Amino acid sequence: METLEVPHVRHYEAAPPTTADLEWADLPTVDLLLARTPEGMDELTKIVKTAMRVHGFLYVINHGLTPEQNARMFDIADIPFSGATDADKQTYLAPMKESGSYQGYKPRQYWHIDSGVKDEIETYSINRDVTKREHPEVLRPFLPEISAFAKFNHFHVLHPLLRLFARAVDLPEDAFVNIHGYDAVGETYVRSMKYYPRSEEDEKKVQQVWLKGHTDIGTVTILWSQPVSALQVLSPNNTWRWVKHVPNALVVNAGDALEFLSGGRLRATIHRVRQPPPDQRGRERLGIFYFAMADDDVVIAPMVPNEEKSSRFTAENVMTMAEWRQARTRAYGHTKLVRNEREKGVEEEVINGVLVRHYN
């Protein structure tokens, strides 16, 4: 990432990693150093092909950001929450219901989780083009760094991964890159996300689930690993396994749009967030994400033969990236879900003709 003259920021101190004996997911690792040679790309393609069929999640290492730069970005990520006033947060609310956009603040207790309990998650999302809208004054000195961070994620992490994903489904290497333009109209963004502890009474009502099992809206989600254990992935044997913190690594998964585009060969993985283990309870959990979406005008129809023969990939429900993200954003956490009587803990809704499932 490019070096900039930077203003002072208060250091964010995260909780130490858990020492709890948890059932960890055995996720494969993509070493981006290998992407520099044809032989390395061949090796990584095999890893990605297996990872996206079996796990849907993977770690990425050797991406090029130093641990010190990583820590600096977490310091900046906390500013929208600890540095902004309540008035700022109201002024810069995201127009989720109005236009299906996450740009700005999502306040706490906006989504319904279960049994009348709402979320305790606060987010602030910034379009990769940081000039798209205004931001709280306290964050403005840091916009050049956030912009550089977005470009780093886009060109040095997302694009190499998209090339690997394309190779994994036998498409030309730049097939997915070409529909993820940095300067195109779209909603790819950097998101800061803070989970706050809640009462034990509410924890019991929702069985310790902070964010119920779901798939992501876009194509690729890049999570910068942080030490509070809460993320779980639904494994192929239908059990929830914890995602372990790996310092200065990335946790990457495919979203719905990439599953659509790949005809189901790159699956959008079901994951959830739950209460951390006992030695980390009572601590906030701060995350940084790069949520990638195809350009708004891209039709998210299969670019390869549809192997899955699923109702999620039909000619009747083809839509653009903009239509899909707007519909999912408006609906999430607000629509009435229908319980699936055949599968315990599964709730469903239909959005723009596509079956969307939630897991609890």
Image (tube, rainbow, N blue to C red):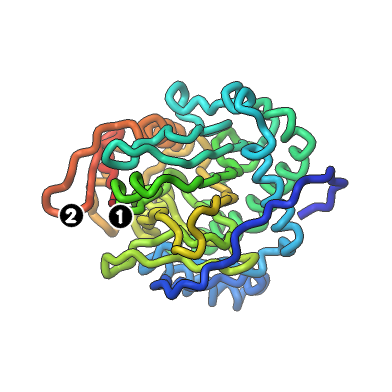
From the viewer's perspective, is residue 103 above or below residue 19?
Answer: above
Q: Which residue is mark 1?
A: 306
Residue type at mark 2 is Lys
In-image side of 335 versus 261 (left or right): left
Q: Amino acid at mark 1?
A: Asn
SS for callout 1: loop
Q: Percent from the top left, x then y, of residue 300?
A: 41, 42
Residue situated in front as seen by the camera: 29 or 212: 212
Report whether 258 appears left or right of 33: left
Q: Quadrant of the N terminus?
A: bottom right
Q: Residue at x 60, y 72 (%)?
A: 31
Instruction: Inspect this view and state whether residue 190 appears.
Output: yes
Q: Residues within 10 Å of mark 2 (few under 14, many from 20)?
A: few
Residue on which disc 2 sits:
344
Q: Residue at x 25, y 38 (%)?
A: 349
Q: Residue at x 70, y 49 (%)?
A: 75
